[in-house]
Image (cartoon, rainbow, N blue to C red):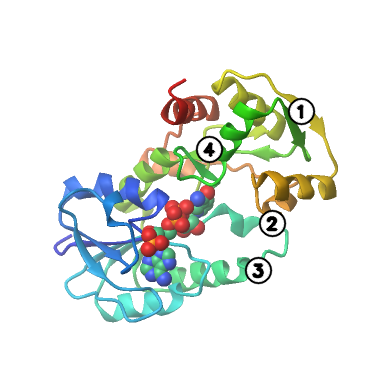
Amino acid sequence: MTGPILLIGGTGFLGSFVAARLAPLGPVVALVRPTSDRSVLPDGLQVRVGDLSSTLPLEGIDTLVYCASMGFGHVPPLVSALEAAGVRRAVFVSTTAIFTSLPAPSRAVRLAAEAAVQASTLDWTILRPTMIYGTDRDRNISRLLRYLRRWPVFPLCGNALWQPVHVEDVADAVVSALDSPLAVRNSYNLPGAQPVRFSELVRTAARAVNRRVLLVPVPIPAAALAARATRLVTPEQVHRLAEDKAFTYADATRDFNYHPRSFAEGVAAEARLLFSV
Ligand SMILES: NC(=O)c1ccc[n+]([C@@H]2O[C@H](COP(=O)([O-])OP(=O)(O)OC[C@H]3O[C@@H](n4cnc5c(N)ncnc54)[C@H](OP(=O)(O)O)[C@@H]3O)[C@@H](O)[C@H]2O)c1
């Protein structure tokens, strides 16, 4: 690498952890929108103001780390712009949600985005985390922990396999993959250490906040109502509750030493962070 790394999505939940890891490694420029909260970026990090929906300032950039969503149609034109600007290395954060069998509206957009990256002349890597958790900026486990501290009963819809991944493990993987020649022109799933049944996930989260929880099985339509009331999950997530979301990651371990923590360890750390328990 000669020029600075451009980090897109650096003010996001995952991106802020990636920014903290990239900043000591060399020149990094974070793309920010005029409305972005720059206070989550490390002190002294360079910024360029721009927006994925318009032409990006790519002068001097030879490496990209992309932590914004691939589900809004920005990626195919971005890939062309990167090629034209002579950017070589690019790591894109996608999602294992592309493997859903449900007709999620963003799935086709995400698949087209991955296809554009894979067809490009870039030295690309695609990383697909499962559900990411770890701080009050996550939109999943932090809500579950808050719920479990207040309520002793949880509506259990389905009992599928989940494999959430801690945000620090994903951020470490982004930086390690960026540096790994083996990861060039490869895609990897990034799940947590082991799959857990949804019932076990909820019980483990309850233990992390020193609570007991009674799991009450409910059919999917009733769970959708409960979700709306508690705002723990979105309607699409309710229907995904019934789907197994378990993935292997031996290729990521082999190519960039990926060793994610267990959910029990990660959720206990999040509970300490949120509630000092
Ligand atoms: N969170 C999860 O559970 C999860 C699970 C699997 C995969 N992923 C993937 O991981 C990546 C990061 O997720 P996240 O939860 O960290 O996302 P996030 O918190 O919503 O952050 C999104 C980032 O993208 C930036 N952004 C959005 N639209 C933009 C635009 N038009 N132009 C420039 N920047 C724009 C945001 O900037 P502002 O600060 O200005 O809003 C923010 O920095 C995404 O690819 C997501 O699909 C996330």
Q: Earlier in the sequence, mark 3 or mark 1?
A: 3
Picture layout, residue 252 above or below residue 103: above
Residue 81 or residue 16, whichever sits in front:
16
Q: Nearer the viewer, mark 3 or mark 1?
A: 1
Q: CA distance from mark 2 to mark 4?
A: 19 Å
Pointer 1: what residue? 215
Picture layout, residue 210 above or below residue 85: above
Q: Residue at x 37, y 45 (%)?
A: 171
Pointer 4: what residue? 142
Pointer 3: what residue? 105
Q: Earlier in the sequence, mark 3 or mark 4?
A: 3
Q: Quadrant of residue 64?
A: bottom left
As shown in the figure, which amino acid type bears the numbered disc 1? Leu
Secondary structure of the residue carrying numbered label 2: helix
Q: How far across and how far down the image is residue 175, in percent?
A: 31, 47
Secondary structure of the residue carrying numbered label 3: loop
